[in-house]
Image (cartoon, rainbow, N blue to C red):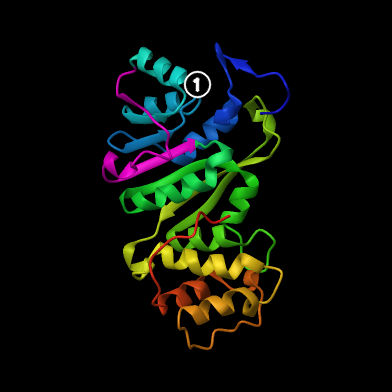
């Protein structure tokens, strides 16, 4: 939260521990809703409805909407409104099994920036049941998500998400579009899960372990970090280790992961 004084909007004080920054710019709101293009009959799920900047216009178009809200006061406010077609789930999105919400989900939200990466990876579990996702995130994170090799933004997050999703930046959002304004620039990204055939049977955990080793010493050549890890896996191929991690494309990492025979265990969320 920017500044020492907590912002108060519509009778609610923004809470720093929840990373609350409420979207208030009408033109930005319209732009996001147009990008989502909600329609009746779709299973829309909003993470963090807040004070309703996106909730109300999306509900007006779609007629039905499920919202997931951690803040007890805000969840109660939404339940008290008794909006027709609105379902309120009071829960931490990181603890919610989104698979329980059904098939063909369209998920969107202005995500708290302090949990954006863990939440993106939490949603991996339900990606097969998702049509698309539209999220407001810190612009730096969106840049990393869609980054190309040989760029400063390219890393584990880029490889993992580009394997699982097709992604497009939708629009940039300045700090003044929020109350209170965050200290960073924001951006909206569209994410469309890849079809099973595109995933080629690769387990996310395998790629996650591989990229963890590759980017553990990103300033050094891959022979220092990835090389020893590949030896532990019994790899005997000719993958070029005389490069730095950011010089290897997501496709090359995926191809390498496909030939490995290592345990499907995770090593933490990519950073």
Residue at left 49%, top 79%? 232
Residue 154 falls in which quadrant of the image?
bottom right
* Residue linked to disc 1: 51
Q: Between residues 155 and 227, which one lies in front from this camera angle?
A: 227
Q: Which residues are magenta?
A: 83-109
Residue at left 49%, top 61%? 160
Q: Is residue 160 left or right of residue 204?
A: right
The picture places residue 22, in percent across and down from the top left corner, at: 57, 26
Helix, strand, or loop for circle 1? Answer: loop
The picture places residue 268, in percent across and down from the top left corner, at: 50, 55
When the figure is inspected, residue 102 is found, relative to residue 264, above or below; the finding is above
Residue at left 39%, top 39%? 95
Farthest residue toward the front? 232
Q: Between residues 259 and 262, which one lies in front from this camera angle?
A: 262
Q: Assess whether residue 99 is covered by the magenta stretch.
A: yes
Q: Is residue 21 left or right of residue 130?
A: right
Q: Assess whether residue 210 is covered by the magenta stretch.
A: no
Q: Between residues 67 and 168, which one lies in front from this camera angle?
A: 67
């Amino acid at each position: 939260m920017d500044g020492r004084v907590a912002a108060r909007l519509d009778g609610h004080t923004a809470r720093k521990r929840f990373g609350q920054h409420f979207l208030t710019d009408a033109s930005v709101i319209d732009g996001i809703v147009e990008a989502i293009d909600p329609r009746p009959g779709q299973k829309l799920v909003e993470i963090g409805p807040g004070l309703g900047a996106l909730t109300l216009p999306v509900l007006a178009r779609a007629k039905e909407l499920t919202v997931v809200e951690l803040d007890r006061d805000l969840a109660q406010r939404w339940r008290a409104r008794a909006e027709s077609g609105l379902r309120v789930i009071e829960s931490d999105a990181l603890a919610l099994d989104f698979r329980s919400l059904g098939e063909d989900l369209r998920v969107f939200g202005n995500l708290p920036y302090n949990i954006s990466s863990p939440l993106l990876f939490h949603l991996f579990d339900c990606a097969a049941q998702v049509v698309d996702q539209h999220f407001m995130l810190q612009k730096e994170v969106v840049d990393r998500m869609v980054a190309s090799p040989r760029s400063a933004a390219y890393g584990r997050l880029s490889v993992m998400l580009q394997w699982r999703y097709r992604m497009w930046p939708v629009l940039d959002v300045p700090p003044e579009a929020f109350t209170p304004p965050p200290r960073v620039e924001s951006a909206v990204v569209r994410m469309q899960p890849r079809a099973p055939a595109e995933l080629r049977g690769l387990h996310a955990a395998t790629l996650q372990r591989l990229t963890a080793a590759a980017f553990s010493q990103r300033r050094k050549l891959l022979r220092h970090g990835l090389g020893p890890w590949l030896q532990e896996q019994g790899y005997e191929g000719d993958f070029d280790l005389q490069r730095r991690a950011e010089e290897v494309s997501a496709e090359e990492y995926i191809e390498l992961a496909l030939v490995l025979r290592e345990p499907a265990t995770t090593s933490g969320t990519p950073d």
